[in-house]
Image (cartoon, helix red, strand yellow):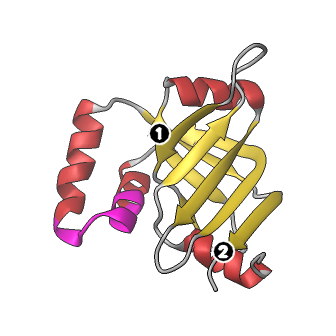
Amino acid sequence: MALSQQEREDFLAEPHTGSLAVAEGSGRAPLAVPIWYHYEPGGELWINTGADTRKTRAIRAAGRFSMLAQRTEPTVRYVSVEGPVLSIEPGSVESSRVMAARYLPASRVDEFVEFERAQLGEHVVIRMRPEHWLSADLGG
């Protein structure tokens, strides 16, 4: 069964590891990678990622991407969104902190942000407006 608009937005707002997919050009299947993402119902979806990664370069070239969030318990449920990139901005300590707090226990956030800033290099925040939605709950 397809989810209602409210159900799909609420589900996407939960902290699932997303599967990001973006076209890489002719002769190639889309690049698909796991990634943390942030979304609030009615708003934009955003990711915080390396400034010069393969996915960032592909997103810049394509101008759009898709994201899938799913679970398998207590029922199989998924939401997939696709849409245009609204902006690509320099990342910040605050954007890193917001993302880390979504996925990690509070006691690990500062450690992760320090690691990310010191070891993973410059980051960007990529914002996307969900334009096309697919969703289903395959439970009984």
Q: At 19% from the left edge and 61% from the top edge, which residue is drawn?
A: 108
Q: In this picture, is 121 found above or below 96? A: above
Q: At 64% from the left edge and 86% from the top edge, which residue is drawn?
A: 140
For badge 1, the amino acid type reads Thr
Determine the residue located farthest toward the front in the rendered image. 140
State yes or no: residue 101 in magenta: yes
Could you tell me how many numbered marks the image carries? 2
Using a 10 Å C-alpha cutoff, classify the residue at mark 2 as few (fewer than 14 neighbours), some (14 to 19) or many (20 or more).
Answer: few
**Viewer-proximal residue, 140 or 70?**
140
- Which quadrant holds residue 121? top left
In the image, which residues are magenta?
Answer: 98-107
Determine the residue located farthest toward the top in the rendered image. 27
Residue identified by numbered label 1: 49
Residue identified by numbered label 2: 138
**Viewer-proximal residue, 32 or 136?**
136
State yes or no: residue 10 in magenta: no
- Which quadrant holds residue 76? bottom right
Residue 14 screen position, x and y as percent: 51, 73
Q: At 70% from the left edge and 18% from the top edge, which residue is drawn?
A: 28
Q: Find numbered disc 1 in the image and state the secondary structure of the residue it sits on.
A: strand
Q: In this picture, is 78 found above or below 50? A: below
Using a 10 Å C-alpha cutoff, classify the residue at mark 1 as few (fewer than 14 neighbours), some (14 to 19) or many (20 or more).
Answer: many
**Viewer-proximal residue, 86 or 81?**
81
Tag nearer the camera, 1 or 2: 2
For badge 2, the amino acid type reads Leu
